[in-house]
Image (cartoon, rainbow, N blue to C red):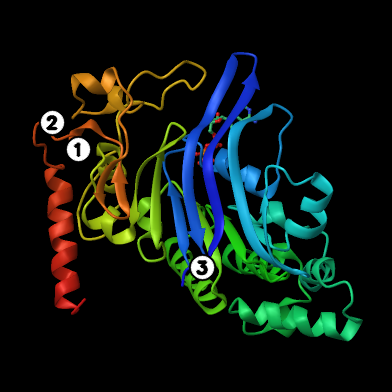
Amino acid sequence: MSQTVLEIKNLQVAYQTEHGEVQAVRGIDYQVQKGETVALVGESGCGKSASVKPIMGEKEANQVIKTGEIKFTYQSKTGEKTIDLLKVNAKVMQSQIKGKEIAMVFQDPMTSLDPTMKINKQVAEAVKASYPDLNKLQVKQRVLELIATVGIQNAEVVQEQYPHQLSGGMRQRIVIAIALAGNPSLLICDEPTTGLDVTIQAKILNLIKHIQKSRKLAVIFITHNLGVVANIATFVNVMYAGKIVETGTSEDIFFDPRHPYTWGLLTAVPDVNEQVKKLPTIAGTIPNLTQPIVGDAFAPRNNYALKIDFEQQPPMFRINQHHYAATWLLDKRAPRVEMPALLQTRIAKMKGAGEADGK
Ligand SMILES: Nc1ncnc2c1ncn2[C@@H]1O[C@H](COP(=O)(O)OP(=O)(O)OP(=O)(O)O)[C@@H](O)[C@H]1O
């Protein structure tokens, strides 16, 4: 039986600026179940972070929640509880939810770690914040356990070091240990591997996958690089200009993508087997979100756009029970359009490799 940990309904977030109101999140809906990883993927500025900050109760002075619900279900001291995170007061958020039930791992570990404090002290603070009744020895043991949980073998040595003495990958492991200190039910990872070199990136991704599986965590994984989530996401939500434009399982998105924006993102993922001098990028830029958007926000950059794309917002067309895409190309009146040849070749190769592996 699946258990819904997070349910977001019609979330709309704007920012007030001197140039007008930026409609950063224009109505998104999705759920995260226990033991699932949901990826939010899209170019910079498409609203990934803006849609996730309200989950953590983060509120910039110019942020306005236009409407929506963020239902979070967790085990409180008195049993299972469902709350709307948009309605929880800041004190409860700080004392009971943030860093405890919901934890976050950011891109740059140095912004999460205190450069002047030894690792053991930083992990211990996180442990004590969630378990104030533990004695000194219990805290010490828990710190070592957490450091070992994130795959650090010489925990005794590492815990005595300062962040600058560790590599980027090790620092990110410590940030993950701190995030796990309160035994959260939801972990939000915001570009956790960006900036790390490819082999370290793969190791951190494996670690997150392992932790997610062994603890049956619900994970939201934010990235601009679709390639990163291929092996860890249960579901992928592709975001563009503040909306989810395609949603499906990893298999749906990687083997049967339907939105031209998803085609663009997939084409931009480097393929180690292809000798491409310059990676194709999606031409053009995201729209100005202070101006009203008519039709499909992606239409001006979409080589496959139909006349109606410039006039009417496409609905989410159903492809299968969990795969939907908002593109007029899926309307039964639309001409038949094939995805770019490069992508077709890649998918055929991936399918071939999968079959050869017996998958
Ligand atoms: N505090 C703010 N004030 C004004 N505009 C903001 C603020 N934060 C975000 N925005 C705008 O909201 C839109 C969505 O930004 P957001 O940071 O959510 O995008 P993102 O997809 O997370 O991008 P990135 O990958 O670069 O973090 C962008 O147009 C951005 O400029």
Identify the disc placed on residue 287. Answer: none
Is the residue 355 above or below the residue 74 in the image?
below
The residue where tag 2 is placed is 334
- SS at circle 1: helix
Give the percent coordinates (x, y) of residue 27: 49, 34
Give the percent coordinates (x, y) of residue 31: 49, 54
Q: Within 10 Å of the Cα at label 1, are there few (<14), some (14-19), or many (20+) other Cα atoms?
A: many
Q: CA distance from mark 2 to mark 3?
A: 43 Å
Q: Quadrant of the C terminus?
A: bottom left
> Which image quadrant for residue 61?
top right
Front residue of 190 and 81: 81
Front residue of 121 and 215: 215
Mark 1 residue type: Leu
Mark 2 residue type: Ala
Give the percent coordinates (x, y) of residue 239: 41, 40
Left or right of 105: which side holds 314?
Answer: left
Q: CA distance from mark 2 to mark 1?
A: 7 Å
Of the image marks 2 and 3, the number of the one nearer the N terminus = 3
Q: CA distance from mark 3 to mark 1?
A: 37 Å
Residue at 83 percent across and 79 percent down: it is 139
Give the percent coordinates (x, y) of residue 167: 61, 66
Identify the disc placed on residue 204. Answer: 3
Mark 3 residue type: Ile
Left or right of 37: which side holds 307?
Answer: left
Foreground tag (2 vs 3): 2
